[in-house]
Each structure stands twice: as C-alpha cells, then as structure tokens.
Amino acid sequence: MNNDTDSDKIHDWTEIRYFKTNPINPDTDSDTLDDFMELNFYTTNPLTNDSDSDSISDPEELFVYNTDPNSADSDGDTLSDYEELFNYSTNPRAIDTDSDGMPDDFEIVWLLDPNNSSDAELDFDNDGLDNLSEYTNGTNLFLNDTDIDGLLDGAEVIHYKTNPFINDTDSDHLLDGEEVYIYFTDPVNSDTDNDGLIDSQEVLIFFTNPLLSDSDMDGISDWKEITCYFTDALKNDTDNEQLSDGEEILGFFYPTNQYGNRTGFFTTNPLNNDTDLDGLLDKDEIVVYLTNPNNNDTDNDGICDGIEVLIYGTNPLTEDSDQDGMPDGWEVLYYFNPVNSTDAEKDFDGDGLTNLEEYFYSTNPRKDDTDNDDLTDYEELFNYQTDPLDEDTDNDGYLDGWEVENGYGPLNPNDPPEQTNPLPQTTKKPITVGAIALNILFAGFLGKIAFTIGWFTIQTIRKKKK
C-alpha cells in the first residue's frame, strides 16, 4: 500500500491528521509551491496561497518581490507590502526608501514623497526646523508652535532646549513663551533666581523679581522674607525706621557709647520700628542716642529711654545724669530734678538728712518720719540707732517713738516688762492701716510721642491708739 499518494514526501496519514492538506494533491493551495516545501522550507501555509493575507501570493513574494510571505509588512514600516508595491511604489524591504532619514510611512502621513530625499530639508511651517528635524523631535510639520506656548518649535529645540510638546517645560505654571518674552525667566528652571520661590509665585502672587533672589536688596532672600520673617520682600525697610530688614534680622555692629570706642551687636524686629516699645525708633536709639533698641531702659535707672530723652532730658546711658549720687529714677520718683546736682545737698523734709543721705539710707526724702514711729529719720539714725524704715526696731510690740518718749530702750525687746505698769492702750503693737507712700508714674505713648499723664501720691491714714 502506497502511503504517499501524491508523492509530496508527506505521508497521507500525516497530511490528514496534522496538516489538513490534500493527500492526493501535492500542492493543496495551488500556489505552485508544493506542500512539503511550504511546510519545511518556506514555513508558509500550504492551505492558502497568500499566507500573510497581504494580497500578494506566496510565490510572488518569494520569487518576484523578495518580500516575506509570512509578514504583510516585510520592512516593518507600518505600510503593507502591497501598499508599498502598488500604491506608493516604495521599497517593501526598506523602511526608508529614499534614505532621507524619514520612514516611508511618516512621509506618506505628512504628505511627503517617500521616493524623494530632498523634502527632508524643506521647512513647510517656517518654524526653524526642517522636515527631518520635525520628524526627529516629533513636532508638527505644518504647525510652527506644536504645543502653543508662544515659542516656535525651532526656538524651543535649538535655542532654549525646552520641550516642544509641553507648553510649560519646567512646570512653574508659566508658559515657555511667557518666560522667554515677557518675564525673561529660564523656561527650563522653575526657580530662575534660586530663591525658593517658583517663577510664577514671584510674578503672579508676590510681584517680586524672578531674576533676583533678593528683590529689595536688603540682604534677605525673597523666600525668607515671605515665609520666615513676614517682611515686605519689595521694601528693604519694612517698618520705615531707616534700618534695612537685613540689618535688623541678621544683626549689625554699632557704637554703644558717645565716644565710639565700644560697639554692640544688635538684631531688632523688622516689623516694629520700636522693638523695645520705649518711644524711640530703633534707628534713633542706635544712631542718635546710642541706647539699646532691645532694652527699654538702657541704663537701668527705672526710667525708660523714651521718657528720659523726650520728657526729662536725662541721659539714657547713665543712671545718674547729673552725677549727684542719686539715680535719675529715684530723683524723678521724689520730684527732684535729675539734671540738677544741687538738690543732693538739700533737705526737703527738714529731718536733718540731705536728699543724698536719704537715698543712701533708703528713707523718704519727702517725709521726715519714713516709718511713722514718731521719731524723725535723723533721730533714728544718729540719736537712737534705730531703723528708720521699721517703726518697731526691737519687735517688742511698741513703737520706737513711744519707747523713747516713755524712757524705754527702743533697741531692747525686753522693756517695758509686760506685767509692770501695764498699758492696755499700747500693750499691743499699734494697728497700722498703712504707712507706705505710693508714688505712681503714669506714662504712655501716643504714636511715637511720649507724654506723662501725671504723678499722684496715695498715703493711707495710720490710726494710733491712745
């Protein structure tokens, strides 16, 4: 029994079982290629004469056009072999028939001639890119600004190195064209001046200069002024005191005495032109008065610098302006003249102590008996050695003055004895409702003009038992 009826070198049983070919016809698809050759050499389909369905028969592809019978697009240019051969007359075995650098399919889509290499150098849209460059960069051959950002494709590719497909290459919310022609910023750097603010924030929100990291030239970057210090990035002296924000924030050296031989390092508040709220501008304190702009009482005399300068005319750099031994604050408290040294030797309360001595002993220069014990301050200090600030020096329950008047010792806590000649009216320490004179200075500021509301004295009444 002959098991290869059609003599195609394939057993009948194999043809029927595996290949579905005709066992009595050596060329099942009648394409002039016998089944054996299709299966074993050409790897084409023996059941159809056009294995790749490109409308060109397998033998034509193999022996006439030298194309791949198993691929409808032999050169992989997205054009079928049939289209290349019969529609465009291009080479189905070459992606770029005219070797101009542009694939055949690209040229056909963009209405170029795939058989003419000269069109690679043409520039249909006059954007500065020839057709080959447009293909290379993926831009539109007939639209000179592919991403519609205000820059020609040629300018983007050649000059600015921006992306011709993205209208905002650096993602700073400004079109590339705006950056180049309006703001003069770098379209490939979102923060042209590297100050921490992206270009769009500078030109659209804060109105700072996107080309300068410090728009107001005060020594502080725009970003720090806006986000850290809350100063005006467009104004180098936010608080209008003639000190730049940079000087106030970063600090600076300046003389701290009238001779200029001592300097201090200062930082002040750039949002407040009177940092220490003493009624003097920071700049005036530093340049004019040489006071400390961060300390409202530079000389620690109890009077703030503004009141010293504007009200009393005292020296805010020394606690004793008239050098009379009495601090300015103490003199003001007791109505003395802090710029007249002659009041040091006067005795306003007539107790025998000069005003300077009263300051030294901490007694009241306006009251001859500071502690209300019926002994003058002078008597207590120089006659009885009692404490002029304590009405009962020996703490025995009796006023110093009463003890002296009745022949007892104001320094002896054991006399008078409690059981001898009892004195019911005074056996207990006299009730002191109050014996402290309060001098209160009211001072305020209206704008930058210092003024004194006034002085007044509160003196409570002391009740003395009889």
Image: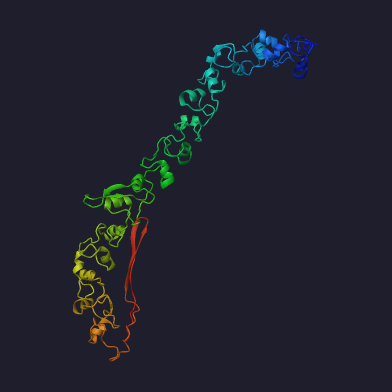
Residue 95 in percent (x, y) is at 59, 15
Residue nearest the viewer, comparing 335 with 161:
161
Residue nearest the viewer, comparing 47 with 226:
47
Residue 435 in percent (x, y) is at 32, 76
Image side of residue 137 versus residue 218, left or right: right
Q: Is residue 113 visible?
A: no
Residue 173 in percent (x, y) is at 51, 35
Can you name the residue that lies furthest to the right here? 1
Residue nearest the viewer, comparing 310 with 164:
164
Vertically, is 187 above or below 322?
above
Can you name the residue that lies furthest to the bottom here? 421
How many marks do you count on the picture? Answer: 0
Q: Is residue 447 visible?
A: yes
Check the picture and name the quadrant holding the N terminus.
Answer: top right
Residue at the (73%, 14%) spot, across then down:
46
Image side of residue 161 versus residue 114, left or right: left
